Image: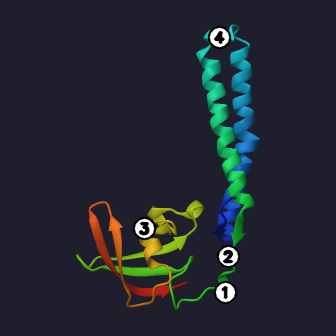
Amino acid sequence: MAKISYVTEEGLERLKKELEQLESVERPKISQQIAEARDKGDLSENAEYDAAKEAQGMLEMKINKLKEVVAHSRILDQSKLNTTTVQILNKVKIKNKKNNTVMQYTLVSESEANLKEGRISVNTPIAKGLLGKKVGDVIIVQIPSGTAEFEVLEISL
């Protein structure tokens, strides 16, 4: 059974565009590379052909995974979100209790995560710890160097 991904409308559009790019541009490009390598003769010792076939296999795996994600994506109705507890698509301001660093993250699906934009996947340890918490709650998260304590300062949309 495939895992359902909850995404924003923009996130689903981005996934569909990437899928279209892979199918309509990248797939024909690799097919062309295979054809050119095949035209060079003996396939048993043709590294170019082997590399192109391997690239084709990787591309097809990526296309199939993306198709599965798109097929099992559900658009979240942002009008039904609230800020009483932390949930997907909320912005959460947290404070590291050890060094008083304040950070803000938006919790999103795995396919929309982008740390540079402050968008973390709901599958990360911090996000999992935050889900369902209220302002003022303190969570303890397992990190590579032990544990970290965070306090929920603010929840917004």
Across and down, in percent, residue 144 comes to 31, 60
Question: What separation in Å lies between label 2 and label 3 (alpha carbons)?
Answer: 22 Å
Q: Earlier in the sequence, mark 4 or mark 1?
A: 4
Question: What separation in Å lies between label 2 and label 4 (alpha carbons)?
Answer: 51 Å
| Residue type, mark 4 in image | Ser
| Residue type, mark 1 in image | Lys
Residue 112 vs 64, above or below: the answer is below
Q: Residue 145 vs residue 59: left or right?
A: left
Q: Quadrant of residue 31?
A: top right
> Which secondary structure, mark 4?
helix
**Contact check, label 3 and label 4, Cβ < 8 Å:** no
Q: Residues within 10 Å of mark 3 (few under 14, many from 20)?
A: some
Q: Which residue is mark 4?
A: 44
Question: What separation in Å lies between label 4 and label 1 (alpha carbons)?
Answer: 59 Å
Question: What separation in Å lies between label 1 and label 3 (alpha carbons)?
Answer: 25 Å
> Which secondary structure, mark 1?
helix
Residue 80's disc is 1
Residue 70's disc is none
Q: Residues within 10 Å of mark 4 (few under 14, many from 20)?
A: few
Question: What separation in Å lies between label 3 and label 4 (alpha carbons)?
Answer: 48 Å
Residue 76's disc is 2
Across and down, in percent, residue 83 comes to 53, 89
Residue 39 vs 34, above or below: the answer is above
Q: Which residue is mark 3?
A: 125
> Which secondary structure, mark 3?
helix
Q: Residues within 10 Å of mark 2 (few under 14, many from 20)?
A: some
**Contact check, label 4 and label 1, Cβ < 8 Å:** no
Residue 54 vs 15, above or below: the answer is above
Report the mark closest to the observer, 1 or 3.
3
